[in-house]
Image (cartoon, helix red, strand yellow):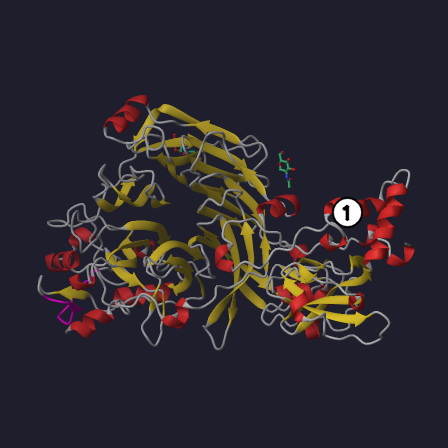
Amino acid sequence: MGRAEAAAMIPGLALLWAAGLGGAAPSTPRLRLSFQELQARHGLRTFRLERTCCYEALLLDEERGRLFVGAENHVASLSLDNISKRAKKLAWPARVEWREECNWAGKDIGTECMNFVKLLHAYNHTHLLACGTGAFHPVCAFVEVGQRLEEPMLRLDPRRLEDGKGKSPYDPRHRAASVLVGEELYSGVAADLMGRDFTIFRSLGQRPSLRTEPHDSRWLNEPKFIKVFWIPESENPDDDKIYFFFRESAVEATPALGRLSVSRVGQICRNDVGGQRSLVNKWTTFLKARLVCSVPGAEGDTNFDQLQDVFLLSSRDRWTPLLYAVFSTSSSIFQGSAVCVYSMNDVRRAFLGPFAHKEGPMHQWVSYQGRVPYPRPGMCPSKTFGTFSSTKDFPDDVIQFARNHPLMYNSVLPIGGRPLFQQVGAGYTFTQITADRVAAADGYYDVLFIGTDAGTVLKVISVPKGGWPNAEGLLLEELHMFEDSAAVTSMQISSKRHQLYVASRSGVAQIPLHRCAAHGRACAECCLARDPYCAWDGAKCTRFQPSAKRRFRRQDVRNGDPSTLCSGDSSHPVLLEQKVLGVEGGSAFLECEARSLQAHVEWTFQRAGESAYTQQVPAEERAERTRRGLLLRGLRRGDSGLYLCAAVEQGFSQPLRRLALHVLSAAQAERLARTEDTAPVAPPGPKLWYRDFLQLVEPGGGGANSLRMCRPQPAPRPQVPESRRKGRNRRTHAPELRAERGPRSAADW
Ligand SMILES: *[C@@H]1O[C@H](CO)[C@@H](O)[C@H](O)[C@H]1NC(C)=O
Ligand SMILES: *[C@@H]1O[C@H](CO)[C@@H](O)[C@H](O)[C@H]1NC(C)=O
């Protein structure tokens, strides 16, 4: 034993950040879509109740076609097809006497002494189980939702309330983590008013309630529960286990290191009924292991120590789902988030490995080397592994060992040994995750939807990298789901309906899983997007149909290489030439924006009267490249000519615009102004645009030199570093070609 070994349990404790990662730039999504854009063009639908906050519990009911929502003082039932349509709501406030007690206890009557509905489970064919904080008086109720699908129902009998202690938290700031298995609820909560008695609790159902050993920091040490899952281990239901995901203060940390946060996975057996002589009505099969999500580095590991959410993605068999988890950091110097993926087999291996052991207060935590009693603690009483039929039959030495050794020595490492995806210095952190397994032309892909504390959802795909099982995450989209950038509190996905449902403090939002047309109008753009939901059908970027003929579903998720897929495809949109006017000495803005944020724009120029294109746009000091176009200052007559811009991505060039710039002399511009002055009435329609132009050349407007653009254009914005753009709405789509009412050529004058 010794320091080194003890430290090995918590690798990289001393260094919470590494130079290499701290300086890394955050990934840029290929598409960034604002709330307004999603609402106007991509089917974003929203739901909110008046004067109600804190939408936290979401329950997806595919059969009834409903999304049940828990919020402040309310439960709502929404249509899965359109959450804005025909919503039903049920008011469920806390009782007046509970609110008064809550207020006497020093809590805020307006923000804390309410019933925050934290938990919703499908209970039986006619009822949901709903639990809320009840103004620091946890309460549960069975909500009748009816059997008939056509007539959504939502009813609660206020005289028949159940005790919510050990099911819902008291404090609205705390989360509830629970799973309903049959009639029994397994939950991880603080079971007291002060929020100190944390427990893993089984309640409801016929059997006596069971809990963790109270006030034993080896079992639970100020935990924050995240998720609970019921996962079978074999065909035999006696082996079924319940897995708890949480984070807590590390008991195994040496005091010198101070308080350290660790993430955990814990297990219990479903058929645990507690011990006979000791651990009576307590778990006898509780074990926990550390869940590691870190990036190894030369100077130490970068640790993402704060588990935020876990999503269980089913695989072919029921007992080996994949676990997708999001983490953030507790460090104040280093802010980042990561996605780590775990295999259930690795979780089970940790529980079969050595136990962590501490001989006494002055000793270090080490790997237990002594004899482990039989049946091995953590094993469920079942015919599969032994002869015990109940935990009450377990020998005393097994119970004693279980009580003193809840922690495993080995940690659970992510698949590939490092995060699948991380985002450092992006100005936001990950809060939620959900995933969808999608059949694409070249195999199956996991598409991840990651909610952030800035009200956005990131769409990330997992693509193989190097040999199996290594993979990396590619950021495809950043979707701004809420107008007010409120943190994402909960997410549900419907693969069947192809919809994502996202909750926050301010409301609930719904969005389809894909927006293929947003990727672009060319085969190459569709291919470069690498979206497993989308393919090029010969004419447009559209939903991928595995059954369609091969040439109508061109897609390359793995490489995103358009050169082979799109060769011979003459589907480039025809680029109409657009005329742009400028005045000598003034400036002109040539608008051109790539749809993809991962593309860069290249300009080529053909001087008027010359036949060759050159890369040389006017000299650097007069030409400023912005995200939205090219700003030319101090215009000269010789700048007249044809400007062609193209988006270049992965070495593939996509022409975007052809702009013909004509630079007028100041005298020409003034002549033009006079003509307009004497014109009796400006004809409406196409000519309107140059009235703005003329205002600019009026002497009162400062003369010809003040002419900044030949056509009213939004002012070009300088590029803002990614990290400073958080929370603002941005325009990200390329402007549509506006050739239909383009300005007339200078020759017309
Ligand atoms: C959803 O329902 C709302 C309210 O009835 C309606 O205005 C909206 O157009 C619907 N959206 C879609 C995409 O069906
Ligand atoms: C569902 O549970 C509720 C609450 O216990 C009960 O009143 C109701 O009868 C049950 N419904 C069915 C179909 O079992």
Between residues 334 and 202, which one lies in front from this camera angle?
A: 334
Q: Nearer the viewer, residue 513 or 693?
A: 693
Q: Is residue 8 left or right of residue 581?
A: left
Horizontally, is 73 left or right of 728 in the view? left
* x then y, percent, for residue 672: 86, 51
Q: Position of residue 26 (x, y in %)?
A: 48, 63
- Which image quadrant for residue 433? bottom left
- Disc 1 CB within 8 Å of nearest ligand 1 atom: no
Residue 174 percent location from the top left of the image? 32, 43
Q: Main secondary structure of the magenta part?
A: loop
Q: Give 153 or 139, whichever is nearer the viewer.
A: 139
Q: Quadrant of residue 189?
A: top left
Residue behind mark 1: 699
Residue 698 in picture, x, y percent from top left: 78, 46
Q: Residue at point 35% right, 50% down?
A: 226
Name the quadrant of the C terminus: bottom right
Query: Compared to 151, does 46 lie above or below?
Result: below
Under mark 1, the amino acid is: Pro
| The one of 379 and 305 positioned closer to us in this rendering | 305
Q: Quadrant of ligand 1?
A: top right
Quarter where residue 340 is shown = bottom left
Q: Which residues are magenta?
A: 363-377
Q: Is residue 154 visible?
A: no
